[in-house]
Image: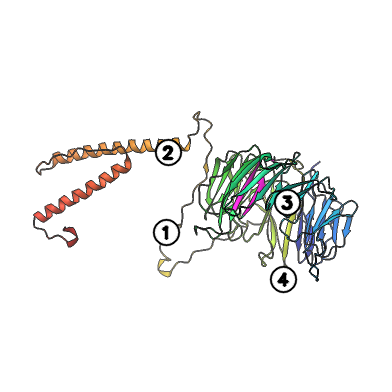
């Protein structure tokens, strides 16, 4: 049986509704449109079977297949919703307000049992950042950060804290995806000259630094982003500072670190200076892509040894998105860039298409691994709101623009579990589309009247670097050279070239001296040091001495010299 077409949930001033995914793109009749203008939050369950939203009056949960209302909670102020991985619990958050007399306010983070509708536990969670508790994929563990401690609950029993991870000033933590045993990545910021560090633990072994699976400490970190790969074997850490003390970047300074659960760690060496815009793991967990460097930015794929595998060159990009199956990579430039996208076949490193989605503020792969949605949403942009659905070969399949007096706030694909959509062979030919090409007309540069009838001369601010395969060629049996060996090889080649150049110069000088009719001078033997830098200096000195001799001859012949030519 063919898998169903994923739905696309659309939230805006026109209300909340769902659109059937490719190929129909019609509004879903199963889900009743909520026409209210106060829909503040929506959430799909991980398997896409349940959908929850808050319409400013209640939080409702429906079965996506038949649109049956399962639960309704009286929570008009809820602004954040999240399902647990197995759909057992719905977490809701609303803004925290303290009581008028200064005492603690009402708990604003609530965990509801989806089956019974009962509120299992309420917490006080003042900050919206990292508001939601984190569950392991099988819901055996639930964790949340409370006053420099990470509290763990087991099997959704929130009456007792099963375990605690206590480190001084724990700022953030991330649970590993996948099956047991669950691992925890913890970040502790540095203070009073001590470095920041990230440690990896295996639950429930929290008995001090010795029990950690891996530890990586570093300076220059005001905040970090920790990214587990799908197989939970390694973490990428993007460490950022708010201010770049060298003054090179307005956006602060970023470094990229790799930490593996077997204890290995490394700093990922990025060949170009500048900010790190995006880092993403391939779903196969054996490589990752980084987009970095001052514009035009570079994009490079690295393996688990942090060696570059393929360099995509430079271009106008600040984001990377792997397809759900990991066989296609999209490099895109959104935000303050024009919305240019490059779609690459990752297996063969071939460019598939280069569509342009101007003014886009959102990008997401469809779970089928073939389609993409780009959207322009408020409040990031309040004009030209709408969404477009593309095929990865560059064809625009569907385009919706909201009326000029309306806004669109969010679009979201219905998720599906891994394996529902099988991976298909990569296509290079654009699929047929009824819509015209979405490529914008290139803007003509202003040319002054005097130059308008003359041929155009191309001038670039910078030269773009082409893509480059960094893998050693499989045909050659030689092992890839180390950095030191490459350096020595270049030095040896430079010395060889310098010797050959010196020999050629010596031959030329000997022929010139024999042909000249001037009185023979004492021939100076040609000297080469073997070092190209020293030889270069010697050559320059010889030129200067020759110029001095010529000036002396001119003075002897009675020629009037300039003031700066006479000692």
Residue ranking furthest to the right = 116
Q: Nearer the viewer, mark 4 or mark 2?
A: 2
Q: 495 or 440, which is in the foreground?
A: 495
Instruction: Report the mark closest to the observer, 4 or 3.
Output: 3
Residue under pointer 3 = 149
Residue ID for mark 2: 487
Q: Quadrant of residue 40?
A: bottom right
Q: Is residue 518 left or right of residue 363?
A: left
Q: Earlier in the sequence, mark 1 or mark 2?
A: 1
What is the number of the mark on residue 457? Answer: 1
Highlighted magenta segment, given as a residue range:
223-239
- The residue under the point 15% across, 50% down is 549
Instruction: State how far apart marks 4 and 2 are (Cα).
Output: 63 Å
Q: Quadrant of residue 326?
A: top right
Q: Tell me the quadrant of the picture where the C terminus can be found.
A: bottom left
Q: Secondary structure at mark 2?
A: helix
| Residue 558 coordinates in the image, percent (x, y) | 8, 57
Element type where label 1 sits in the image: loop
Q: Give the number of the disc on residue 405.
A: 4
Residue under the image location 44 percent in, 35 percent down: 485
Task: Give the spatial CA distance, label 4 vs label 3.
Answer: 48 Å
Q: Earlier in the sequence, mark 4 or mark 3?
A: 3
Locate residue 534, reporting x and y percent: 30, 42
Q: Secondary structure at mark 3?
A: strand
Q: Is residue 437 left or right of residue 538?
A: right
């Amino acid at each position: 049986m063919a898998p169903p077409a994923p739905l696309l949930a659309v939230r805006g001033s026109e209300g909340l509704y769902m659109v059937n995914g490719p190929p129909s793109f019609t509004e879903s009749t199963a889900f009743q449109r909520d026409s209210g203008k106060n829909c503040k939050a929506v959430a799909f369950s991980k398997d896409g079977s349940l959908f929850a939203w808050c319409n400013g009056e209640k939080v409702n949960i429906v079965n996506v297949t038949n649109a049956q209302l399962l639960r309704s909670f009286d929570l008009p102020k809820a602004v954040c919703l999240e399902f647990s991985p197995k759909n057992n619990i719905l977490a809701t958050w609303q803004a925290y307000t303290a009581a008028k007399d200064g005492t603690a306010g009402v708990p604003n983070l609530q965990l509801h049992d989806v089956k019974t509708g009962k509120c299992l536990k309420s917490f006080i969670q003042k900050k919206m950042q990292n508001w939601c508790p984190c569950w392991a994929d099988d819901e055996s563990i639930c964790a949340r950060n409370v006053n420099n401690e990470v509290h763990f609950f087991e099997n959704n029993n929130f009456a007792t804290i099963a375990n605690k991870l206590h480190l001084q000033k724990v700022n953030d933590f991330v649970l590993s995806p996948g099956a047991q045993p669950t691992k925890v990545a913890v970040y502790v910021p540095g203070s009073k000259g001590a470095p920041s560090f990230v440690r990896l633990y295996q639950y429930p072994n929290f008995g001090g630094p010795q029990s950690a699976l891996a530890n990586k400490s570093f300076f220059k970190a005001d905040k970090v982003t920790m990214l587990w790969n799908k197989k939970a074997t390694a973490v990428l850490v993007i460490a950022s500072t708010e201010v770049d003390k060298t003054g090179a970047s307005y956006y602060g300074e970023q470094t990229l670190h790799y930490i593996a659960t077997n204890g290995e760690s490394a700093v990922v060496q990025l060949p170009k200076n500048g900010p790190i815009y995006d880092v993403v793991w391939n779903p196969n967990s054996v490589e990752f892509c980084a987009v970095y460097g001052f514009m035009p930015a570079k994009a490079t794929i690295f393996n688990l040894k942090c060696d570059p595998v393929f360099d995509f060159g430079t271009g106008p990009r600040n984001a990377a998105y792997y397809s759900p199956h990991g066989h296609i990579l999209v490099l895109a430039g959104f935000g303050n860039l024009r919305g240019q996208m490059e779609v690459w076949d990752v297996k063969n490193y071939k460019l598939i298409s280069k569509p342009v989605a101007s003014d886009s503020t959102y990008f997401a792969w469809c779970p089928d691994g073939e389609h993409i949605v780009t959207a322009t949403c408020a409040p990031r942009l309040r004009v030209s709101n709408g969404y477009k659905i593309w095929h990865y070969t560059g064809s625009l399949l569907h385009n919706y623009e909201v009326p000029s007096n309306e806004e669109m706030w969010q679009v979201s694909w219905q998720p599906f579990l891994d394996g529902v959509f099988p991976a298909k062979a990569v296509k290079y030919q654009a699929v047929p589309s009824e819509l015209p090409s979405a490529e914008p007309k290139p803007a003509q540069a202003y040319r002054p009247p005097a130059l308008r009838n003359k041929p155009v001369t191309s001038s670039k601010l910078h030269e773009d670097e082409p893509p480059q395969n960094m893998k050693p060629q499989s045909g050659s049996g030689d092992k890839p050279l180390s950095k030191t060996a490459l350096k020595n090889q270049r030095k040896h080649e430079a010395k060889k070239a310098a010797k050959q150049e010196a020999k050629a110069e010596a031959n030329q000088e000997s022929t010139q001296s024999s042909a000249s009719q001037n009185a023979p001078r004492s021939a100076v033997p040609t000297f080469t040091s073997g070092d190209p830098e020293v030889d270069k200096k010697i050559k320059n000195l010889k030129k200067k001495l020759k110029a001095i001799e010529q000036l002396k001859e001119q003075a002897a012949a009675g020629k009037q010299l300039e003031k700066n030519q006479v000692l």
